[in-house]
Amino acid sequence: MSKKKEMLLVGSKTKEALKGKGYNVSSDAMDAMNDYVYWIIDQAQKKCAANGRKTIRPYDILAK
């Protein structure tokens, strides 16, 4: 069983953005978004390390 990760997102702002034009947001959507943010961070750290750097740059985060 995995330990629940600390929430990195501001709930009210994220829900507002997700709702868009009349969409509903399920109760577990925030957890999924938070898990995705942790995954993005992990990928950026790996890319940075693979390039021999200790500074994460925007291109380590953005997928292109």
Image (cartoon, rainbow, N blue to C red):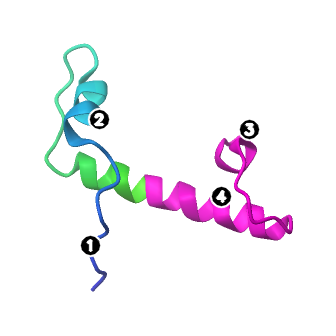
Q: Residue at x 28, y 80 (%)?
A: 3
Q: Kindly identify which numbered label has been placed on residue 4.
A: 1
Magenta span of residues: 37-64
Of the residues shown, which amino acid type is indicated by label 1?
Answer: Lys
Of the residues shown, which amino acid type is indicated by label 2?
Answer: Thr
Around disc 2, counting alpha carbons within 10 Å, would you say few (fewer than 14), some (14 to 19), or many (20 or more)? some
Q: Kindly identify which numbered label has been placed on residue 14.
A: 2
In the image, residue 54 lies at what x, y percent?
75, 66
Indicate whether residue 46 is drawn in magenta.
Answer: yes
Q: Earlier in the sequence, mark 4 or mark 3?
A: 4
Marks 2 and 1 sit apart, C-alpha to C-alpha, by 19 Å
Badge nearest the viewer, 2 or 3: 2
- Name which quarter of the figure residue 18 lies in: top left
- Name which quarter of the figure residue 42 lies in: bottom right
Around disc 3, counting alpha carbons within 10 Å, would you say few (fewer than 14), some (14 to 19), or many (20 or more)? few
Residue designated by label 3: 64
- Name which quarter of the figure residue 13 lies in: top left
